[in-house]
Amino acid sequence: MAELMARDHQPGREDETRLERFMRHKPPTFTGGYNPEGAVKWLEEVEIIFEAMGCSEENK
């Protein structure tokens, strides 16, 4: 258990852990192209995930 805790607090691992948590929420995929409404919807859905994760503005 102590090894897991130490591994999770290594430099750079925090960002990796944050990304893993984000991906577990199954974020929507933005495919690009010209679709302003789709882009806004995508951004709103991603913001909901960030809120659920308690992300700071810096980590978004």
Image (cartoon, rainbow, N blue to C red):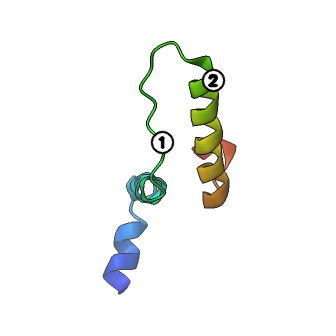
Label number found at residue 37: 2
The quarter in which the C terminus is drawn is: top right
Q: Residue at x 68, y 43 (%)?
A: 57
Q: CA distance from mark 1 to mark 2?
A: 14 Å
Mark 1 element type: loop
Compared to residue 42, the image places residue 3 above or below, namely: below
Q: Secondary structure at mark 2?
A: helix
Q: Residue 41 placed where, x, y %?
A: 62, 33
Disc 1 + disc 2, Cβ < 8 Å: no
Q: Mark 1 highlights which residue?
A: 28
Residue 1 lies left or right of residue 40; in this view the side is left
What's the residue at 67%, 49% (across, down)? 56
Identify the residue at image location x=39%, y=58%.
Answer: 13
Task: Tell me if residue 38 comes above or below residue 58 in the rendering.
Answer: above
Q: Residues within 10 Å of mark 2 (few under 14, many from 20)?
A: few
Amino acid marked by disc 2: Glu
